[in-house]
């Protein structure tokens, strides 16, 4: 039941609903006195049960994801968004529900690049997204130094993002990649349209009060992440978020308002399966 319930999560239903469906299928198999069931029969029973109990759209999402497991092209989910919007937590939960083992972030890419590239060669990657302008020469007098510094960092890290995507394609492995350095317009999913299903979403926290609350909560439970710097730079982070959202609108990238974690997870799962269905 646990294995089956986990596979049902890809249909964008809550874990308790998935386990309830799994229990109902178990009861049906026991009623039939079946000592074994092959994979195709089980999937047909799952689809029928989902359609009867939760509707055609849920059953359709399950069919799409199960059929996609036979695809010759990997699915690569990109989650863009400013610092602190909850990208990494969402990426990990979506990966669990879809059974995707490879999850990484642009923070990891940037850390590797920091070792390879000195501050003299690539100053922007040796700072945070919101204060990169302070280390890039010539930006102090720019019209919007915060955004220019952020874009300088994202442009450099985009090289590593492309490398990760191309590696995933070469290995035919599904991947979820999140990060502030994944910018709509700077990374073009259409470039890989023939080799992978690249799905691009932007994650945001549109309520400034809730956004501030995330950093305050982080300050209480994760002091080692120096959350006080996020709070001190909240205005700059909000400006970066506005910039990302404007780019998302300009380039047709859907936006997920992470007001509710569970709701955002389900929203991402629905978008993934419905995009693959198209």
Image (cartoon, rainbow, N blue to C red):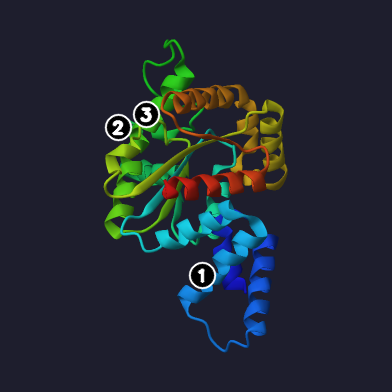
Q: Residues within 10 Å of mark 3 (few under 14, many from 20)?
A: some
Seen in the image, is 66 located left or right of residue 32? left
Q: Earlier in the sequence, mark 1 or mark 2?
A: 1
Q: Earlier in the sequence, mark 1 or mark 3?
A: 1
Q: Which residue is mark 3?
A: 185
Q: Is residue 64 above or below residue 233?
A: below
* Quarter that holds the C terminus: top left
Report how many numbered discs are placed on residues in the image. 3
Seen in the image, is 5 located left or right of residue 198? right
Q: Which residue is mark 2?
A: 121
Q: Which residue is mark 1?
A: 43
In whole angstroms, how far apart are the C-alphas of marks 1 and 3? 40 Å
In whole angstroms, how far apart are the C-alphas of marks 1 and 2? 54 Å
Q: Nearer the viewer, mark 2 or mark 3?
A: 3
Q: Earlier in the sequence, mark 2 or mark 3?
A: 2
Measuring from the top left, give residue 119's x and y in whole percent: 36, 33
Q: Is residue 203 above or below residue 101?
A: above
For numbered disc 3, what is the local secondary structure?
Answer: loop
Q: Nearer the viewer, mark 1 or mark 2?
A: 1
- Residue at coordinates 42% horizontally, 36% vertically from top-left? 182
- Residue at coordinates 46% horizontally, 56% vertically from top-left? 64
In whole angstroms, how far apart are the C-alphas of marks 2 and 3? 24 Å
Measuring from the top left, give residue 2's x and y in whole percent: 61, 72
């Amino acid at each position: 039941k646990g294995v089956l319930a986990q596979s049902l999560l890809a249909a964008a239903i809550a874990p308790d609903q998935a386990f309830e469906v799994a229990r109902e299928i178990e009861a049906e198999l026991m009623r039939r006195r079946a000592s074994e069931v092959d994979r195709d029969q089980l999937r047909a029973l799952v689809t029928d049960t989902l359609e009867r109990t939760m509707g055609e759209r849920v059953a359709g999402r399950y069919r799409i994801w199960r059929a996609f497991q036979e695809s010759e092209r990997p699915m690569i989910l990109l989650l863009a968004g400013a610092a602190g919007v909850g990208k990494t937590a969402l990426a990990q939960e979506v990966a669990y529900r879809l059974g995707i083992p490879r999850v990484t972030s642009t923070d990891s890419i940037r850390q590797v690049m920091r070792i390879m590239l000195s501050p003299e060669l690539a100053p922007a990657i040796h700072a945070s997204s919101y204060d990169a302008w302070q280390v890039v020469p010539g930006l102090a007098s720019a019209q919007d130094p915060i955004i220019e510094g952020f874009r300088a960092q994202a442009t450099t890290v985009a090289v590593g993002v492309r490398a990760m995507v191309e590696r995933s394609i070469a290995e035919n492995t599904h991947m979820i990649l999140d990060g502030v350095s994944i910018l709509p317009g700077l990374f073009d999913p259409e470039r890989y349209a023939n080799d992978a299903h690249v799905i691009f979403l932007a994650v945001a926290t549109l309520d400034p009060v809730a956004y501030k609350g995330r950093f305050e909560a982080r300050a209480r439970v994760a002091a080692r992440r120096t959350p006080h710097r996020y709070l001190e730079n909240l205005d700059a982070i909000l400006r970066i978020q506005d910039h990302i959202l404007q780019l998302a609108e300009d380039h047709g990238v859907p936006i997920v308002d992470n007001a509710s974690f569970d709701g955002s997870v389900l929203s991402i799962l629905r978008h993934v399966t419905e995009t693959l269905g198209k």
